[in-house]
Image (cartoon, grey):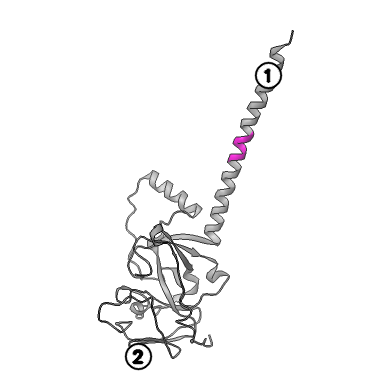
């Protein structure tokens, strides 16, 4: 007669060990995925949402964009890039009080940690980079165009009010200092950009150290999905100045 007890115990032990091994593998995979997401969000790419209409029609309110953080950390920025940057000081109002509950805050913190959340979007700005260090930028010529280093720009991305030809309602002429950039919204008559902070201590220039990265795609909603162009043809004739 076969001893059934002797034959069933090893099987039960094997099954129990199999579940432990599976659970351990799942935990390891989860932890690795979270760490990878965190590293990507910290050093490579992250998401932001658009809270205002200053970049219409390129970007719409509540669009989500993906930002390449390797620019300008590793690769240089180019004129025409759509960039996200921290408030250089006084560009944004004080953040509104956070009225979310503990659960909402916890979920938001986790999503931010892995790069899927964008709770700090209202503490950043998104504009188009017009001038690099050393560039001389002026507006407007007889055709209503802006010039960079003496070259008039044809800017197809600019949204103007009906009947308006000048790409800026505020005339200006500036030279971008070393380590700074000059930025403007595509919705030129509804964008408090570098032009409107010229009297600030920073002169309207954005330190390169404050630039989080270059936005390269609209990721949400799906109906707005598109690559973001830096319009190289617009700036093709602009020569670099000594920085």
Name the mark on residue 141: 2
- Going from N to C along the chain, the mark reached first, 1 or 2, is 1
Q: In which quarter of the image is residue 157?
A: bottom left
Span colored in magenta: 21-26
Identify the element where label 1 is drawn.
Answer: helix
Q: Position of residue 206 (x, y in %)?
A: 44, 75
Q: Mark 1 points at which residue?
A: 9
Q: Quadrant of residue 4?
A: top right
The quadrant of the rendering that contains the N terminus is top right
Q: Does the magenta run of residues contain 24?
A: yes
Question: Is 235 displayed left or right of 31 in the figure?
Answer: left
- The residue at the point 47 percent across, 82 percent down is 235
Q: Position of residue 62 (x, y in %)?
A: 35, 60
Q: In which quarter of the image is residue 190?
A: bottom left
Between residue 230 and residue 91, name the one nearer to us. 230
| Label 1: how many Cα within 10 Å (few below 14, some 14–19, many 20+) | few
- The residue at the point 61 percent across, 37 percent down is 24
Question: Is 144 displayed left or right of 151 in the figure?
Answer: left
**Eyeballing the image, is 203 above or below 32?**
below
- The residue at the point 69 percent across, 13 percent down is 5
- The residue at the point 52 percent across, 61 percent down is 45
**Eyeballing the image, is 96 above or below 79?**
above
Question: Is 32 displayed left or right of 109 in the figure?
Answer: right
**Eyeballing the image, is 126 above or below 236?**
above
Q: Position of residue 134 (x, y in %)?
A: 49, 85
């Amino acid at each position: 007669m076969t001893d059934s007890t002797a034959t069933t115990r090893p099987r039960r032990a094997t099954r129990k060990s199999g579940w432990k091994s599976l659970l351990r593998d799942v935990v390891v995979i989860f932890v690795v995925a979270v760490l990878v997401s965190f590293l990507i969000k910290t050093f490579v790419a992250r998401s932001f949402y658009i809270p205002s209409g200053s970049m219409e029609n390129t970007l719409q309110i509540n669009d989500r964009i993906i930002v390449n953080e390797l620019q300008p950390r590793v690769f240089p920025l180019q004129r025409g890039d759509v960039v996200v940057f921290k408030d250089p000081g006084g560009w944004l109002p004080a953040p509104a009080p956070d009225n979310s509950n503990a659960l909402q805050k916890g979920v938001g913190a986790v999503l931010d940690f892995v790069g899927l959340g964008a709770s700090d979007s209202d503490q950043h700005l998104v504009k188009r980079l017009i001038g690099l260090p050393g560039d001389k930028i002026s507006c407007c010529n007889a055709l209503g165009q802006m010039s960079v280093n003496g070259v008039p720009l044809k800017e197809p991305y600019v949204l103007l009010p009906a009947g308006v030809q000048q790409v800026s309602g505020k005339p200006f002429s500036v030279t971008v200092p070393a380590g700074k950039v000059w930025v403007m919204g595509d919705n030129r008559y509804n964008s408090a950009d570098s032009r409107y902070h010229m009297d600030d201590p920073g002169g309207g220039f954005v330190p390169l150290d404050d630039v989080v990265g270059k936005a390269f795609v609209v990721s949400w909603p799906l109906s707005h999905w598109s690559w973001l162009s830096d319009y190289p043809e617009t700036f093709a004739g602009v020569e670099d100045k000594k920085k």
